Amino acid sequence: MTDRLSDLTSWHSDWAGLRVGVLGLGKTGFSVADTLVELGATVLVVAQHAEDAQVQLVEVIGAGLVLDPVLDAAPPELVELNPEVLVVSPGFHPDHPVLVWAAGQGIPVWGDVELAWRLRDKVGEPAEWIAVTGTNGKTTTVQLTATMLVDGGFRAAPCGNIGIPILDAIRDPAGFDVLVVELSSYQLHSTSSMSPYASVCLNVAEDHLDWHGSLDAYIAAKARVYTNTKVACVYNKSDARTMRMVEEAEVIDGARAIGFGLGVPGPSDFGIVDGILCDRAFTEERRIAALEITTVTDLALRDLAAPHVVSNILAATALARSYGVPIEAIRRSLERFELDHHRIELVAVQGGVSWVDDSKATNAHAADASLGAYESVVWVAGGLLKGVDIDVLVKGRASRLRAAILIGVDRSDLRTAFQRHAPGVPVFEVDETETEEVMSAAVRLAADVAQPGDVVLLAPAAASMDQFVDYADRGRRFAQAVRDHLGGGGS
């Protein structure tokens, strides 16, 4: 079984008749099933739920399907298939009963990224991959890196965890020079063959501990991004964990370590000197000079000067420069780049109070960076904490808080953290539990306490699914509640 898999390293390998179980039927799971059926494999999709349209599509492409809302054991159809490999969607924890069964049977488990790496030569010369992970900032960095590459004249696309499945990207008939691949810790956990052109782990903080089981396991998954990197291992100089990842990584001979940070850069780094973002890594005179990228002042004019955003810009620039993008193209990209919605997005300003939607701050690390960008904050926080200890965040940012507005079905951990570490900060709780009412109540409470010069900041430090569809739904509802409350008077 395993011997056959070791030979399957190309689209043009013999995949015909390979027995594959696919776990999950979201966007990723369908892309896996669709790809494998195209290759001639025998495919059985196993999922707990699926939309009607997806069910119909699975039938159209000719894959089998088992829907089991409980899925507390390997279904009989999967056992009968006796799969040679399982390809798992990111939502399945390593201790899921089906994966435990697979381990007991000695069945290898891949993710969609592992499969895509093996199939990347479908349309000719394979695109190089630039791999991006980190607890926060992945999407911004991926989008910006791809934009820089395109402005530099390369055929490039963002894909992976960013929303475009990697298997769709490698099957695009036009082909690409380079793919910028956003990788979650879930995807890296089940990836072993990838050898990226350049890679970065932007930062590491406690997140998804409910999935990985421990911080060490989470860090180990993130560290896989550097394995077999060919040209540039980009790391965060202010995050010692990412530096250790690079130091301990097995890379291709000749790969360079490239640091980025908000301080003065060393001879192989990207950083800031007197408010100027500089490249001291990809210039022939890097030991005595640096190339100017842009200035913090120019970035501020486009709302891109928050410290964590500047860090992402430096990381993206390092990745793009490693691939040969000229500085002039980098500048063009930065002149037109805009952050995604729900990422420190200014909703309104009225009476000297700014209202900011950072609903995408779904963990403590992201919320910490967001809080650090403002001097006086009315903080709207709460949701699903995903097993993360919130105490450090509350203690570290208490001095910036005018007040806190707590949302979420279970607010006990946040409430306790404020009682323990910030007893002087006024805390208000939203008792409304109906989705349509939560943000209206939160905005009313925030408006009552905010003073001129304050920022009312939605940076929940938690996932959203306890009360909302996703972080975007949460952000949209916050923005609408702000506009309703201000009566259209914001600017």
Image (cartoon, rainbow, N blue to C red):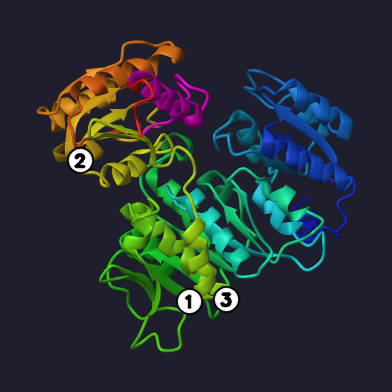
Please say if 234 is above or below 206. Answer: below
Residue 279 visible in image? yes
Q: For this view, does 280 lie left or right of residue 470?
A: left
| N-term mark: 3 or 2 | 3
Instruction: Please tell me which residue lies in front, 239 or 227.
Output: 239
At 71% from the left edge and 41% from the top edge, which residue is drawn?
Answer: 86
The residue that disc 1 covers is 256
Q: Position of residue 99 (x, y in %)?
A: 62, 35
The residue that disc 2 covers is 397
At 82% from the left edge and 58% from the top edge, which residue is drawn?
Answer: 11
Q: Which mark is residue 324?
A: 3
Please say if 418 is above or below 329. Answer: above
Q: Position of residue 177 (x, y in %)?
A: 70, 67
Q: Position of residue 112 (x, y in %)?
A: 67, 46
**Residue 469 part of the magenta segment:** yes
**Mark 1: which secondary structure?**
strand
Q: Residue furthest left?
A: 424
Q: Amino acid at mark 3?
A: Gly
The main secondary structure of the magenta stretch is helix
